[in-house]
Image: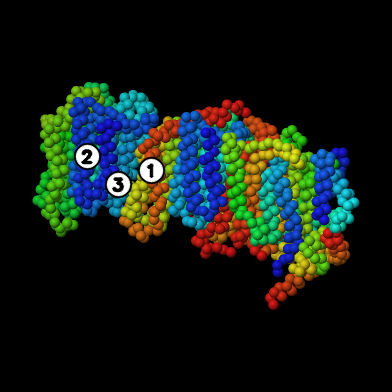
Amino acid sequence: MDKIIILPVILPLIAGLVFILLRSYIKVQRILSVVTLVAVMITSIFMMVHINQHGILTMQLGNWQAPFGIGIVADMFSTLLVLTTSIVAICCVIFAFKTIEKEREEHYFYALFLFLISGVIGSFLTGDLFNLYVFFEVLLLASYVLVTLGGKKVQLREAMKYVIINILSSILFLVGIAYMYSITGTLSFAHISVRIAEAGQDGFITTVAILFLLVFAVKAGLFLFYWLPGSYSVPPTAVSAVFAALLTKVGIYAIIRMFTLIFYHEPEITHVFIGVLAALTMILGGIGAIGYWEIEKILTYNVVIGTGFILAGLAAFTHNGLLGATYYLIHDMIIKALIFLIGGVIVYLTGTNNLKEMSGLIRTHPYLGWMFFIAALSLIGIPPLSGFIGKVFITRGTFEADLFWLGIIGLLASLLILYSIMKVFMNAFWGETLLSEEEEYGSTKGVMVAISILTFITIALGIGPEFIQPYVDTAVEALMNPQLYIDAVFGGNDIP
Amino acid sequence: MFDTLMILSLTILTVAILLNLFRLVRGPSNADRVQALDAIGINLISGIAIFSVFLHTHAFFELILLIGILSFIGTIAFARFIERGYAIERKR
Amino acid sequence: MSASAEVIAGIFIFVGTIISLISAIGLVRLPDVYTRSHAGSKSSTLGVLSVLVGTLLYFVISEGYFSIRLILGIVFVFLTAPVAAHVICRAAYRSNVPLTETSAEDQLKDYFEQQSKEVNE
Amino acid sequence: MPFQILVNILLAFLWIFFQDNWSFLTFLEGYIIGIFILLFTRRFFKAPFYLLFVYAAFKLVYVFVRELISSAITVIRQVLRPKINITPGIFRIDTDLKGDVEITLLSLLICLTPGSVVMEVTPDDKSLYVHAMDIPDSKNSVLKSQKIFERAIKDVTRKYV
Amino acid sequence: METLVAIVIGILFTIGTYLILSNQMLRIILGLSILSHAVNLMIITMGGLKQGGPPLLAENTTRFTDPVPQALILTAIVINFAVTAFLLVLSYRTYKMHGTDNMDELRGNRHG
Amino acid sequence: MKPNDVILHTVTKLASVIIFAFSIHLFMAGHHQPGGGFIGGLTTTAGIILLFLAFDIETIRKNLPIDYKMLAALGVLISVLTGVGGLVLGEAFLEQMFDYIDVPLFGNVELATAVLFDIGVAFAVIGTSVSIILSISEDDL
Amino acid sequence: MSFLHFIVLMPFLATILIPFLYKKWGHRIHTGWFVVFVPLTIFISLLLYLPEISNGNFIATSMPWIPSLGINLDIYLDGLALMFALIISGIGVLVVIYSIFYMSKEREALHNFYIYLLLFMGAMLGLVISDNVLALYTVWELTSISSFLLIAYWYERKKSRAGALKAMLITVFGGLMMLAGLIMLAMISDTYSIREMIASVNVIQDSYLFIPAMILLLLGAFTKSAQFPFSIWLPDAMEAPTPISAYLHSATMVKAGIYLVARMTPIFGGHSLWFWLVAGIGLLTLLYGSLRAVRQTDLKALLAFSTISQLGLIMSLLGVGSAAYYFSGGEQQELYALALFAALFHLFNHSTFKGALFMVVGIIDLESGTRDIRRLGGLMAIMPVTFTIAVIGSLSMAGLPPFNGFLSKEMFFTGMLQAAEVNMFTLEGFTILFPIIAWVASVFTFIYCFILLFKPFFGSLRLDQLPKKKVREAPLGMLVPPSILAILVVVIFFLPNVLSDSLLKPALLSIGPFTSLNEIPFEITAWHGWNTEIYMTIGVIVVGLLLFFMVKNWNSILRIYPDNLSLNSLYNSGIEKMESSSSSFTNFYMTGSIRHYIMYILIAFVGILATAVISLDSVSFNLNFKANVSIYDVSILAAMVVAAFMTLLTKNRITAIVSLGAVGYLMVMVYVIFRAPDLALTQMVVETATTVLFLLCFYHLPKFGKRIEKLPFKLTNFLVAISVGLTFTVLTLIATNHKLYHSISSYFENAYELAGAKNIVNAILVDFRGFDTMMEIAVLLIAGLGVFTLIKLRSKDGDNNETK
Ligand code: NA
Ligand code: NA
C-alpha cells in the first residue's frame, strides 16, 4: 500500500512524457490526460483512507533509510491537497479541450500541463528540502512555458517578469537550503525537525526560518506578490485557472509545512510575523481587488487575498486556526479554479476584459451567471458554501491566539472580496443585455461541464464538510504534532 | 620544494590568465576576445594539470580533455559567428 | 622514484607555465589580432603541451599510472590549436578587422577584390 | 593496413590469454611481440608493413613538434623584446597537394611554422593565403619548409598506404 | 578560507543585485547568473572547504570533502542551465516582438 | 565569397570521433570516476554541435536522423521507468540494484540498474540540449 | 430531522419546485398561488406550537450538520422565536397574496421573484429559531443575499443594482462583525449553542472578550436593523418591488437585528455599555429617521425613513430594558423589564401597521403610476378602502387611539421616563435626554404620519400630473392583505392581552430576567389615568398638528443641512473615492516595472533578515582569514571578482557576456580547488553552453548605454546592492560558524558497499538522491520544450514589431 504514494507524482510525469512521443495524437492526449488525473484522484482517495486508518504513509525512495535518501511523505494534509489538485486539474483540462487552440495542443500543451501537475503534487509529497526545490523548479518551468505558450506580445512581456522574479526567489531558496544544511547537516524535513528540536531554535535558526518564509512568500504571493497579477492574466483561461488554484498554494503549503514541522519553537516571533504579512497581504490584495474594472485583475487580486487569509490560520497556530487553514486551502483551490474559469468564459463571450463594456449576460447565460454567483458567495465565505468553515475556524484560531486584529482584518477582507466580486457579477451579468447570443464572441459550448463540476464541489464541500472532517482533523492533528511525521519517516530506525 | 614550484607555476599561470583577461576585456575586435578566450581555455588546462599533480589526484583528468574540447568548440562557434553572423548554418 | 618524478615533472611544468605567461604577454603586447594569433595559438599550445607532458610523466614515474586520458588531451590540443588560430584569423579578416599599420603586404585583399569583381561581372 | 593492425591487436590479445594476466602492460607486451611476428610474415601481406606508415606518421609528428617549438621560440623572442619591431603581412603559397587530408595537414603544419597562420584556402584547394608575423623573416622560412612538409605528408598519405 | 569565500559571495551578491536592478534584459540575466554562481559557492562552502580529497573512493585518501553539497550544486547547475536557456530565448523573443530590450518600456499598461 | 572549410571539416571529423569516444568514457566511468550520464550526455552534445558548426544542419540531419525532443522524452521516460521497475518488483520506487557477475573475457563486471537510469539521463540531456540549439538555430538568430 | 426542521427547510425545498411549476403553468396560473401554500402551511403549523409555548415551555431539537465540530442545526423554539416566526410566516402569506396581484405574470420573471422570496423566508425562519450561532450566521447572511437579489430584482435598472449592492455591503459587513462576535462568544463559552452560552453567562461576563464581542454583535444588529449611521441602505432598498419592501424592509429582515439584540440581552444585559449603546443608538436612530422622513417626497422613501425611526424606537426600548438585568428582582427590575415588554409589543404592532402602509403605498403606486406626494392628491374618493387602511395604519403609527400603536407608544414613553431615572450607570445626567428625544421624535413621527395620510388622499386630484390616465381602486386581492393587517391593528388595541398572554409574555420570558411566566406582571391597558405619558401624547398631538399645518414655514430649516454631507452621499462619494484611490494606490506600487518589483522583494528580504538577525542577537562569527588559504585560492577568487566587476562595468554586450563566461570558468577552478571534479566538469560544459546561448540571443542587440542612467537610479541600485551583499555576507559568515551537527554525508562514504559506486557524488546523484536527478532532467526537458515552442509557436499579434 505504501507504494502507491509515488503514483500521484509519476503518473502525470509519465503521461506527459508519453504525450511528447505521441505529439500529433491530440485526441489520445486529451483522453489520457483525464484518465491519468482520475487515476491520481483515485489513488489519493485510497491514500486518505489508508492514512486515516494506519497513519502517515511514507516511502523512502531507492529504499535508502531516512535521512539519507529522499523520502516521500504523505500525511493527511498533503494528501488532501493532492486530491484537490487532481480534481482541479481534471476540471481545468476538460475546460482546456474546448478552449485551447489546436496550435497550442500540438505544442505540448497537455504534456506541459501534466508536468505542472506532477511538480505541484511532488511539492506536496516530498519530505526533503532540496527535493522540494527541485519540484518547485519542475512546476515553475512548466508554468513558464505555459505562460508563454502562444507567444503573444503581452504573454512574452509578462513572462519575462514572471520568470525573472521566480528565478530570483529560487536563488534565495537555495541560499536558505545552504544555511539549513550548514546548521543541521541534513536535508530531510523530519531530520531537520529532530535536530532543531534537539539543539533549540536559536536566533540564527529563526532568521533562516524567516528567510524561508520570505522565499515561499514570493511563491505564495504572500505580501511579495507583485509579480502575480501580471503573469496570471496573460495565459489562456485553463492555464490561469490552474495557476490561480495551484501555484500559490504550493508556496502556502511549503510555509505551513515548514512552520508546523520545523520552525514551530518560536511562534511569538515567526508566526506572529506571518500574521503581519498575512494582514498586509489581505489589505493590499483587497485594495487591489476593489480598484479595478478588469475581470482578470479583480480575480487575481482575489488570489492574493486568499493567500493572506489562509496564512492567517497558520499565524494563529492553534488547532482551530490550522483546521480553518486546511479547509480554506482546499476551498480556495477549488474556488479559484472555478472563478477563473467563469471569468475566462465571460471574457471569451464578450470579447472584452473591461466590465464597463459588458452587461446583462444573465439573460443569455443564466446557468453561467448563477454559478458565478454561487462561486462569488463561496469566495466570500458565505455559508453553507465551501469557504465558510475555513473562514470561521481561521477567525476563531486568530482570536484564540489573541491576534484579534488579524481575525478582524480577515473578515473585513472578505467584505472587499464581496465588493470586488459583486462588481463583476453586477456588471457582467446584470444590466441591459448588450449582445444577443449570435453576436457573442464565443459560446459556452463544452465548457460548462468543468464549471458545473467545480460549482457542485463548492456546494458539496460547504454542505457536507462532515464527510471530510475526519480527514481534515487527522491532517491538523499531524500538523500540530510533528512527532507523528517524524516517527512515520524514521519508522523504528535510529535517528543519526 | 616541489610544492612551492607548483604554487609558483600556478601563480605564473594566474598572471597569464589575468593578462588574457585584459585582452578579453580590451578587445578591440571580437576576434581578439575569442582569441583571448581560447588562450584562457588553454591556460585552464595547464592549471588543472598542475592542480592534479599538486593534489596528487587523477580526478581532474577528464576535465583536461573536456576543456580542450569545449575551448575548441567555443572558438569555432565564435569564429563562425563573427565571420557569418550566425553560428550554425541551416542549409548549404 | 618520486624525487625524479618531481624533478622531471617540475621542469616540464615550470617551463610550460613560463611559455604560457610569455604568450599571454604577447597577447597583450602584439599590435593586431593576426599577430596576436601567433602568440595565442602557438606559444600557449606549447606551454600547455609541456605542462601536460610533465603531468603525464609525473604520474607515470611516481605511480606507474599511464593516463590515456592525458595522452588524448595532448593529442586533442595538438590537433585543434592550429585550426583555432586559422579559424579566428579568417573570421577576423572576413569581419574586416584591419591589419596593423606596419603590415607590409596583403595579397588576400587583392584576391578578394578580384573575386568580387568576377562576381559582379 | 587496417587488416595488419587488426591482426596485431588479435595477437596482443592472444598473448594476454597465454599470460592469463589482464592488464595494459601485458597487452603492450603482446602488441610488441605481434609487431615482430608481423615483421617476419610481412611478405604474406600485399601492403607494405604498416609500421612504416606509423614511422612516417611519427616523423610527421616530429616535424610538427619541431616546428612548434621553433615557432614558439620565434614568437617569444619577439614578444619579449623591449620594443616590438615587426612587419606582418599576408602572402600566397601554391601547393600541389590533393585531397582534404593533405591540405589540412599542410595547413596545420604551416600554422605551426614560426610566425605564420593560414588565413584562407582557395576554393580550388590550390593556394593558401598565409599571414606572417614578420614578412622578411617568415615568408622565406615558410616557403622553404613547405617542400619538407609536402614530402612528409605524402609519405604518410601516399607512400605506405 | 570560509571567511574569504563568504566575502567573495557577498561581493558577487552585490554585483548580481546591481545588475538585476538594471533596465536592460541582458544585464538582468547576467545578474541572475552571477547570483547563481554566488549561491553555488555558498552551498559548497556550507559543506566545509578543503577538508579532504575529492569524493572518489578510488583515490588513496581516507578523508573526503562533503559530497552532498556537490551533488546538490550539480542538480542546481543543471536546473539553472535549463532556466537560463529558456530565459535567454524568451528575452530574445520578447525583444523581437516588442522591439526593445529595455524592461522599463516593457511595463505594459500598468501591470495588466 | 564562401570560405573553404576544408581544414575545419577534416579536423572536425577526427575531433568529433574523439569527443564521442570520450563522452562514452565519461558516461561509463561516471559510477566510479568523475563523469556520469549528465556530463557524458553534454559531451556528446558538444560533439554533435561541433558537427553542426563545422557542417550545417541539413547535412547532419541526414546522417543522424534523430528527433531530439523525442529522444529527450524517451530519456526521462527510461529514468522514470527504472524507478517504476523497482516498484513493480515490490521494492521502493527508484530502488537501484547492482550485482557483480563473471563474464568471460571481461571478468568480474558490475551490472547496475543505475546505469540504465544514467542512460536515461544522458538521452534526456542530449535530446534537450541539441533540440534547444536546433530550435535557436532554425530561427533567424 | 424534526418537523420543525422540515418547516424551516420547506421554503428551500419549494425553491426547487418553483422553476418547474413556473415553466409548466406559469403562463396560465400566477406562480404566487403555488407559493402561498408555503407560508400558509408554516403559519398553521407554527400555530400548533402556540399553546405549548404560551405556557412558557420551549421546544429544542437538533439535526446534525457538522457534528464533529459541534456545528448542528439546533432548533430552539421559545416565545421569542415563535413570535418572530409567526410574524414572518403570517405576513409572508399576506405578502404573497398581495404580490399575486402586484406582480404581472406576463411581464415578470416570477420564478426568480418567488425563489428569492422563499429563500428569504426560509432564512428568516431559520434565523429566529436557530440555537447554533453558526447556523444563525448562515441564515443571517442568506437574508442579506436574498435581500440583495430581491432589491435588484429589476436588475436592468442602475438604481436597483446600486441599492442592492449598498444593502449587501452594509449588512454583510455587519454580518461579518457579528460572526466575529459570535466566534468570541463561542470561544469563551466553548459552545456554539446560544442557550448554553446564556447558561454560562458568568464565564462570558468575566472574559476580557466580553466588550469586544458585545460591540461586534451590536454592529451586526445595528447594520441589519438600519440603525444610525448604518441606516442609509434602507431607503435605497426601496428599489425592490413593493411587496418585498413590505415584507423585508418593514416586517421581517430589518427586525433580525432587533431579534439579535433581544436574544443577546440575557448575556449582555445589565452592562452599562450595552445599555448606552443600544438605547443611545436607538434613540438617535429614532430621531434621525423621523426628521428625515418628514422631508421625503417619495412615499416609499418616507416609509423607509419611518421604518428606520421605528426600529430605533424598538432598539432604544431594548436598551433601556436591558437595565433590568442589573437588578436581581425587585420593583426596579420590573420597571425596566417593562421596556423590554414594550419593545416586543411595538415590534409586533409595527409589523402590522407598517406592512399595511407599504401595501397601501404599493396600491397608490400601481394605480396612479407615481409615489411622488407633490403630484398626488385627492385619492380618498377614488380609493376608499385603501384610504381607510391608510388612516388606520398611519394613525396607529402616529400613536393615536384606538389603534395598537397608541398602546405601545404609551409604553415607550413609560420606558423612556424610566430610563431618565437610571442611576446605576455612569453618565447618569444624560439619561434625562431620553424622554426628551423620545418626545421630539414622536412629534415628527406624528407629522410624517399625517403627511403620509393627507398628501395623497386629501386635496385635489390632478390627473394631468399622473402617469396613468385612469386611476381606480385596487382589485380585491390586493386589498385583502392590508385589510387583514388593518383589522389586526384595531383588534390588538381592544384585545391587547390576548396577544400579550399568548405571545408577548412567552417572548419576554425568553429575553427578560424571569424564570417563569408567573413572574411577569404586565397587563396592557389603554388608560392609565392622567400620567406623564398621556400628557406627552397630548403634547405630541398638539405640537404635531401645529407643525404639520405650518410645514411650509419650517421645512426649509431641515434643508439647511446640505445634501452632499448626508450619510448617503458620503457613502456614494466614499465608494467612488475608495475605488479611485485604491486603484491609484495600487497603480502606485504595481508599476509593471520589473525593477521595482525586484527592489521591493530585495528590500523586504534584506530589511527583514537584517532586522531579524540583529534583533535576535545572533550575529556571531570569527573572522579567520588565514586558515587554509593559499595564494592560488586568493588569485582565483580575486580573478572571479574582477571578472564579475567587468560584467558590471562594461558598456559592451559581448564583453559583458564574455566576462560572465570568465566568472563561470573561474568557478570551474574554484570547484577544482575545492575538490569537486564532477562539478568542475559539469560547470565547464554548462558554462560553455550558457555563454554560447547568451551570445546567440544577444549578439544582434544594440550596444548598451544608449540611455544614460540617472544618478538617483544608480544610487538606489547601489544602495540596495550593497545592502544585499552585506546582509548575505554576514549571514553566510554566521552560517559557516553555526554548524550544530555533523553532516549526514559520512554515510555516503560507504557508497561502494551500498550502491556499488566509487564516485560518491555520482552515487548520490543516480542512487541516493536519484529522484532529484530524475526530476531535474524533467526540468531540462521542459525547458527544451519551452525553447522549442517559443521559437515555433508564434502569435501574429507582433508581426509588425518583428525587428530584424
Ligand atoms: Na457593465
Ligand atoms: Na606557423
- Disc 2 vs disc 3: Cβ atoms closer than 8 Å? no
Q: Nearer the viewer, residue A112 or C23?
A: A112
| Picture quarter with ligand 1 | bottom left
In the picture, the disc for residue A456 is 1
Is the shortest distance between ligand 1 and the CB of mark 1 under 8 Å? no
Total of numbered circles in the picture? 3
Q: Nearer the viewer, mark 1 or mark 3?
A: 1
- Disc 1 vs disc 3: Cβ atoms closer than 8 Å? no
Q: Nearer the viewer, mark 2 or mark 1?
A: 1
Q: Label 2 belongs to which residue?
A: G39
Question: Residue drawn at (62%, 57%), measured in percent from left and top?
Answer: F134
Q: Label 3 belongs to which residue?
A: G149
Q: Nearer the viewer, mark 2 or mark 3?
A: 2
From this view, report whether residue G224 is shown above or below residue D116. above
Chain letter of disc 3?
G
Chain letter of disc 2?
G
Mark 1 and mark 3 on one chain: no
Question: Residue drawn at (74%, 46%), measured in percent from left and top?
Answer: B62
Q: Nearer the viewer, residue B5 or G150?
A: G150
Question: What element does badge 2 sit on?
Answer: helix
Q: CA distance from mark 2 to mark 1?
A: 29 Å
Chain letter of disc 1?
A
Would residue G318 be seen by someone viewing this image from the given angle? Answer: yes
In x, y percent, where is residue A66?
A: 60, 32
